[in-house]
Every structure is written in C-alpha cells, then in structure tokens.
Image (cartoon, grey):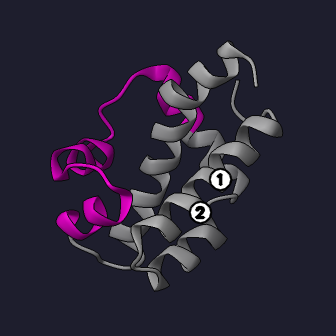
Amino acid sequence: MNTLMCLNISRVILPAVRINIAKQLDGKYDLRQIEIARRLGVAQVAVSKYLSGKYSESLKRAVDKIERSGIVDSAVIRLVKMDSAQEIDAVVNELCTRIATDNLVN
C-alpha cells in the first residue's frame, strides 16, 4: 500500500467510517455516546464531534459517499453484537481496507 493511500485512510476514510458507524449506533440502536466511544475505541468527545456534523467539507463528502454506498450497514449489525475490542477493530479495519481498495472515497 502506498503512502498516499495510507494517508487517505488515516485522514479521511477511517474518520468517515467511524462517523457512519457512530450515526447508526446513535440513531438506529439508541446507544449512548460513551458506549459508542467504547466500541469505536475513541473518546466520547470524538463521538460528540462525529454526531454534530461539524467537520471539513472533504470529510463530509466522504461520509456521504460511504453512507450512500450502504457498505457500513451490515458491519454495524455485526458491531452491535460484538463486545471485544479486537473484533470491533477487525470489522472497522475490514471496512477501511474495502473502501480504500474499491476507491470508494478519493
């Protein structure tokens, strides 16, 4: 994997995936921010920011593309049933890799 792809994953794809997951866990599953943060391995303040919608235009575009693709939907169903940080990390990693490989977000 080249350096540009890695930068894209860390700066755009991973945050966009986390935002999509957080929005679904909040909206569809009514989880509290602290529980969403625990599952995603981030601070509660990060989840608050994800749910506020206050992020850069490029990140908003990535979030919208991922949301429209539906790629996160089945992963969220799996995540709701998981409690192990390793399992959750594996699902998020799988999503990021798939999005980067399919060039879903540029």
Part of the protein shown in magenta: 33-62
Q: Residues within 10 Å of mark 2 (few under 14, many from 20)?
A: some
- Secondary structure of residue under mark 2: helix
Above or below, 38 relative to 30 = above
Q: Which residue is mark 2?
A: 91
Q: CA distance from mark 1 to mark 2?
A: 6 Å
Residue 29 placement, left or right of 51: right
Indicate whether residue 27 is drawn in magenta: no
Above or below, 10 relative to 74 = above
Q: Residue at x 59, y 63 (%)?
A: 91
Q: Amino acid at mark 1?
A: Leu
Q: Residue at x 62, y 60 (%)?
A: 72
Residue 45: image location, x then y, percent: 16, 45
What secondary structure predominates along the stretch shown in magenta? helix
Q: Which residue is mark 1?
A: 95
- Secondary structure of residue under mark 1: helix
Residue 76 placement, left or right of 100: left
Instruction: Name the one closer to the observer, 69 or 89.
Output: 89
Residue 13: image location, x then y, percent: 57, 35
**Most distant residue in the right direction:** 102
Q: Amino acid at mark 2?
A: Val
Residue 41: image location, x then y, percent: 32, 55
- Tag 1 near tag 2, CB within 8 Å: yes
Residue 88: image location, x then y, percent: 48, 66
Above or below, 25 relative to 98 = below
